[in-house]
């Protein structure tokens, strides 16, 4: 390595160290409105919170999750589905107005209300289990130039005397909220979607200003679907989810149109536009 190359490498190392030091001084997440949820793009563009049904799920150990090219997630913990993303979004939403690393206290009733759940004994038990399982996770996330290593929740426990849940988020998670590295997702649309795949698609496409065409096989991989047949995934699960998302988005005044360009072997292309003036390809096979 030449002296010039060595100098440049040292300069980049100092810049990176200064950037990480600056991150640690940033103690609060960016703010968003009550009708939004702020989520790192890497989590929305991956199979971390899979589009799978409730039920028995395996424990994963240092599993490299399917994701887009500019991000990577290595995950340890129980296989997570979209229900866990909904809970995590609400926890981050509650914690966004205070310093990261501090105790965030919220009543179980308040959390269930945010989740649009009734305050019943059964729902309280499910919420406690979900908080415990979110805490018992380990992630290594690379998102652009930034990385995060830690759990989805640092601490989660209940104060039996006050009935409050105590939540602590890792301060370093702010690395995933830098610049355009996160998306403010419409909570109203997500809340009204019926299927886990529709929720995943909503978050995924919300991270794209001008979505690229994706093959059905690639969407199947990225969403973590456990559907064994690509044909069934395309014609049943995906078709229903896309139509659900288009209908719900329209009811909330947002534009979402799609077209599935039929090709054999899972190579069908899904075209999506969120721009009302944009044109989809001609000769649509399925559109909405």
Image (tube, grey):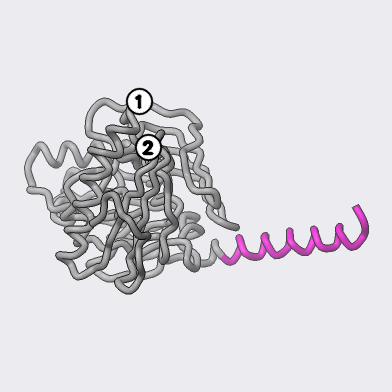
Q: Quadrant of residue 268?
A: top left
Q: Residue at x 51, y 59 (%)?
A: 175
Picture coordinates of residue 60, whole percent (x, y): 42, 29
Toward the viewer: 53 or 160?
53
Residue 184 in sight in this render:
yes
Callout 1: SS: loop
Provide the residue span drawn in magenta.
1-22
Q: Residue at x 37, y 37 (%)?
A: 224
Toward the viewer: 38 or 122?
38
Residue 19, magenta (yes or no) = yes
Disc 1 versus disc 2: nearer the observer: 2
Instruction: Tell me how far mark 1 sits from mark 2, CA to CA.
Output: 13 Å
Toward the viewer: 229 or 21?
229
In this picture, is 153 found above or below 227? below
Residue 107 in sight in this render:
no
What residue is shown with label 2? Answer: 224
Question: Which comes sooner in the sequence, label 1 or label 2?
Answer: 1
In this picture, is 34 found above or below 218? below
Residue 17, magenta (yes or no) = yes
Q: Residue furthest bottom?
A: 277
What residue is shown with label 1? Answer: 58
Q: Residue furthest front?
A: 283
Q: Residue at x 27, y 43 (%)?
A: 238
Q: Is residue 143 left or right of residue 267?
A: right
């Amino acid at each position: 390595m030449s002296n010039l190359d060595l100098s440049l490498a040292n300069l980049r190392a100092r810049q990176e160290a200064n950037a990480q030091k600056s991150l640690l001084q940033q103690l609060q997440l960016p703010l968003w409105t009550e009708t939004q949820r702020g989520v790192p793009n890497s989590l929305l563009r991956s199979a971390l919170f899979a589009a799978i049904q409730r039920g028995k799920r395996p424990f994963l150990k240092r599993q490299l999750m399917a994701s887009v090219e500019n991000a990577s997630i290595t995950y340890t913990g129980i296989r997570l589905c979209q229900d866990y993303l909904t809970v995590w979004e609400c926890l981050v939403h509650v914690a966004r107005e205070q310093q990261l690393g501090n105790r965030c206290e919220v009543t179980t009733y308040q959390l269930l209300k945010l989740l649009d759940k009734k305050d019943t004994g059964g729902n309280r038990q499910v919420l406690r289990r979900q908080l415990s399982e979110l805490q018992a996770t380990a992630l290594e996330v690379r998102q652009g130039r930034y990385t995060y290593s830690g759990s989805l929740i640092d601490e989660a426990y209940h104060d039996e005397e006050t009935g409050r849940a105590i939540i602590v988020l890792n301060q370093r998670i702010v690395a995933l909220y830098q610049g355009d590295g996160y998306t403010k997702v419409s909570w109203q649309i997500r809340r009204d979607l019926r299927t886990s795949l529709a929720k995943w698609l909503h978050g995924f496409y919300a991270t794209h200003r001008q979505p690229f065409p994706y093959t059905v096989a690639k969407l199947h991989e990225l969403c973590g679907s456990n559907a064994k047949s690509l044909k069934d995934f395309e014609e049943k699960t995906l078709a229903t989810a896309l139509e659900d998302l288009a209908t719900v988005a329209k009811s909330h005044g947002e534009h979402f149109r799609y077209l599935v360009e039929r090709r054999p072997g899972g190579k069908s292309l899904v075209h999506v536009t969120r721009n009302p003036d944009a044109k989809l390809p001609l000769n649509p096979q399925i559109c909405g």
